[in-house]
Amino acid sequence: MMKITILAGDGIGPEITREAVLLLEEVANQFGHHFDFQYGKIGGIAVDEEGTPLPEKTIRLCQESDAILLGAVGGPKWDHEEPSRKPETGLLQLRKTLQLFANLRPVNVFPAILDSSPLKPEVVNGANFLIVRELTSGLYFGKPRGRKIGELGTEVIDTLYYSEFEIERILRQAFELARLREKKVTSVDKANVLESSRLWRETAERVAEGYPDVYLEHMLVDNAAMQLIREPNQFDVIVTENMFGDILSDEASMITGSLGMLPSASLGDGPGLYEPVHGSAPDIAGLNIANPLATFASVAMLLKYSLQLTKEADYVEQAIEKTLNEGYRTKDIATDKERSYTTQEIGEVVRKHLAARDSTTIGVKK
Ligand code: IPM
Ligand code: MG
């Protein structure tokens, strides 16, 4: 019996995680597993109901589970809350508490929706890379931070802190993952300016010595932002610090056509956390038009990395691809000429494909 904690969160979180649970139930039915779902609160809803974006009870639920699936947090309603009551703080604290230092964000172009990318099809076609973002240090967590009134008026400070230990463990993770792919690591930094990046680069060189079969290149982050758009096909594994990874992964989502297509896994030593990269999209919350595919792809990552159900994960990915191949699209990826489908309709089609799975194409590397 595997325990999965569902943290629906805010905005479109509840509607996409509802579909994800239905998908997981279908996986359980089809393959004879039993998943035990527990539900916890995080983000704005937790602030409203419990006065904190990450209640103790939620932490405990997460710690006791095999995997965590999260929808999204945040929304304009909580924009003016003080930092400790911001929905985003709940997510950051959860990442930190569970030591989820490795954030995997695969960017995969589906041929069926090449036209939904704002980039030329010949540029994005075939792009398939993995962003490995450091998730529990850097500018997001460095101390000191804060705001005070000084001689020059209001003064603010954020700190970009990294220890060598933190840099080394995320780089190792990237090299290990590259070994399972095309064996190329692009380490992204700003070593021409930042001290933290200089240590990052030295550490990358040192770690690389243990992986002679993997090719390492360094790239400055501004150049990386440009190269992603110019020639996304050059990348295999991109590894970078927290803030750069946050920015580059949103940029990279446009290669796939929509932010609604990008899944993620956050891994540490305990249970993994899986979430779509897109946010809570408050403007379309409750309308049943959100794209559930990034959450479904996150479900596939959950099956693979936390439950070791590799075959089931492959089938979920196959079902997503078939759904797209048959022309089913939510509004965000439908072109002007195409009809768009609701969140629930897409969920139903993906489940149907899972039930009618084709075992002949499983395990064949894309
Ligand atoms: C992400 C998000 C979060 C981040 C926010 C919601 C705190 O943008 O997961 O990329 O900045 O890490
Ligand atoms: Mg982000």
Image (cartoon, grey):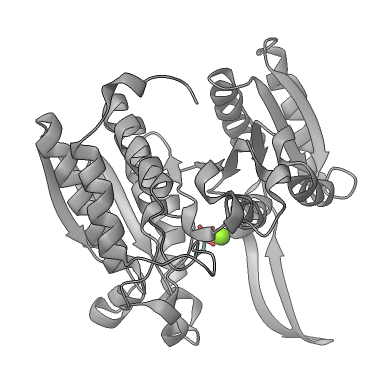
Residue 273 visible in the shown view:
no
- Whether 212 is drawn above or below 243: the answer is above
Q: Could you tell whether 356 is left or right of 215 in the image?
A: left
Observer-nearest of 253 and 44 = 253
Give percent across and percent down for residue 314. 34, 30
Quadrant, the N terminus: top left
Q: Could you tell whether 17 is left or right of 178 in the image?
A: left
Give percent across and percent down for residue 126. 63, 35
Q: Tag count in the figure?
A: 0
Quarter of the image for residue 185 reads top right
Quarter of the image for residue 85 reads bottom left
Residue 290 visible in the shown view:
yes
Q: Could you tell whether 56 is left or right of 206 in the image?
A: left
Quarter of the image for residue 159 reads bottom right
Query: Ligand 2, what quadrant?
Result: bottom right
- Whether 237 is drawn above or below 52: the answer is above
Residue at point 39%, 51% (across, down): 97
The residue furthest top is 212
Residue at point 42%, 86% (across, down): 77
- Whether 120 is drawn above or below 272: the answer is below
Observer-nearest of 103 and 343 = 343
The residue furthest front is 337
Give percent across and percent down for residue 319. 32, 40
Give percent across and percent down for residue 92. 46, 59
The residue furthest right is 192
Observer-nearest of 266 and 343 = 343
